[in-house]
Image (spheres, helix red, strand yellow):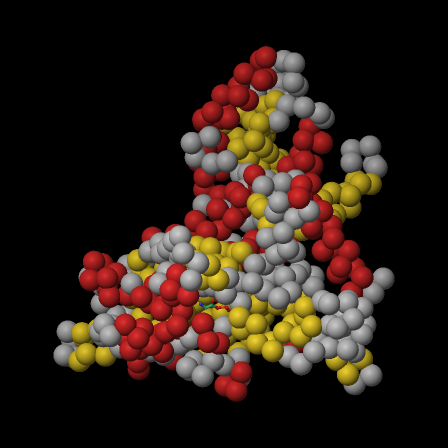
Amino acid sequence: MTQDKSASERMEKIVSLCKRRGFIMQSSEIYGGLNGCWDYGPLGTELKRNLKDFWWRRMVRERDDIVGMDGSILMNRQVWVASGHEATFSDPMVDCRSCKSRLRADQLSEKDGKLHCPVCGSFDLTEARAFNLMFKTYVGATEDESAITYLRPETAQAIFVQFKNVLEVSRKKVPFGIAQIGKAFRNEINPRNFTFRSREFEQMELEYFCRPEDGVELLEYWLKERLKFYEDVGISSDLLHVHKIPPEERAHYSQGTYDIEFHFAFGVQELEGVAYRTDYDLSQHQKASGKSLEYFDEETGQHFVPHVVEPSAGVDRTVLALICAGFCEETITDQKGKAETRTVLKFHPRMAPIKCGIFPLLKNNERLVGPAREIVESLRPHMMVFYDESGAIGRRYRRQDEVGTPFGVTVDFDTIGENGPSNQGTVTIRERDSMKQVRVPIGELKSFLVDRIN
Ligand code: GAP
């Protein structure tokens, strides 16, 4: 089997698992879907929430120098004029005259030395023209020029235009940052690779404001911090790649940009950009709005427009990376010597949608079911748990393996003292990856699990 074929088969299995187990589904599926839009099911929603909560914890709650904000999706059109998005936020587009497909000119490949349509193979393509990626809309009841604005294509601009307000209320001193998580929208010409390139997606962005002389060093600092973050959510460093963008490919205002890339089955692709954007954004808004966005440095007595380093990550892309990194098929042998394939999502426990499955060994035995249900209630305030009493215990473990639940707790006859007093009041905890089991007193269960999922 070629590398490409096995990679695409792996991706197909991942997409199918995502739908079958309620991680990610096509948006508006019963009407044929909407290209580039996705819905997260119960487990996908938990996974996404765990990721966003951990990012927030790392970036805001555990630090003294970063505060949060939550800006509106619709903003005054002038924001997008000043930021340069209205004039230049575009991709080059070509049309295929034969099959009418719209294609991104920079993603076409050559056949016999000429660009061709990947859909029908024709060479009959139009000249490339710029296609603005922002979704245009009208605010209010009149659909005229004065009512035009856009769905935000990035969350960052709300941070820049609120810089002064947030600085005043938070009373921070440079260097300090403003963090935000929220939806962004881009009318991508070619949404593809499952959720990787979507038209509606979420970003986790930090704008870290600093003195001009500290920008270069802080770029390196934030690259390291962000790489550590990925390790801490269970994406090992050998699945990541740092691409230093050469000066000729960087935005004109950037003094340094790194892309943090992930080895997806469909290629090595960007998860996050870490960019030193100088004072470009604040200066643009200062000029366009006529309002000072300068910072007064009490230490030096200077007024200046702060520079900014921006780590900007995609929520959906990171969720996809977590699923791809965790997906694993293993051959195991059961007690009767029969080989079977075990599908496991090896999520880091802090990312796993369900932290613990709880199983009474037998369904119709109230002496087992009662304590199992009590355990569910005692753990529920602290973590997402799942109670399952149907089917053989091995199958219940497999069902949880497939959705990445790191721990399974079984209430058995030892728990209720039927096999003597030595294990009474204890349960077995099975660990997903090693499949090893340990006995733990029910009273210690919560702290055992809490220690491992945080
Ligand atoms: N404020 C800077 C900014 O928006 P970007 O590189 O255009 O930079 C940052 O976007 C991140 O947002 C990307 O690294 C990616 O994770 C995510 N992202 C961008 N476009 C996306 C799309 N169409 N679908 C899913 N995620 C996307």
- Quarter of the rendering containing residue 263: bottom right
Q: Position of residue 137 (x, y in %)?
A: 46, 59
Q: Is residue 271 left or right of residue 436?
A: left
Q: Position of residue 202 (x, y in %)?
A: 49, 56
Q: Quadrant of the C terminus?
A: top left
Residue drawn at point x = 62 percent, y = 18 percent = 413
367, above or below 403, in the image? above
Q: Position of residue 43 (x, y in %)?
A: 57, 41
Residue drawn at point x = 68 percent, y = 70 percent = 103
The answer, for residue 429, to whether it is visible in the render is no
Total numbered labels placed on residues in the image: 0
Q: Nearer the viewer, residue 2 or 293?
A: 293
Q: Is residue 141 left or right of residue 237?
A: left
Q: Nearer the viewer, residue 25 or 207?
A: 25
12, above or below 189, in the image? above
The answer, for residue 331, to whether it is visible in the render is yes
Residue drawn at point x = 43 percent, y = 35 percent = 382
Q: Nearer the viewer, residue 226 or 238?
A: 226
166, above or below 217, in the image? above
Q: Is residue 197 left or right of residue 288?
A: right
Q: Position of residue 99 (x, y in %)?
A: 77, 67
Q: Quadrant of the N terminus?
A: bottom right
Residue drawn at point x = 78 percent, y = 36 percent = 334
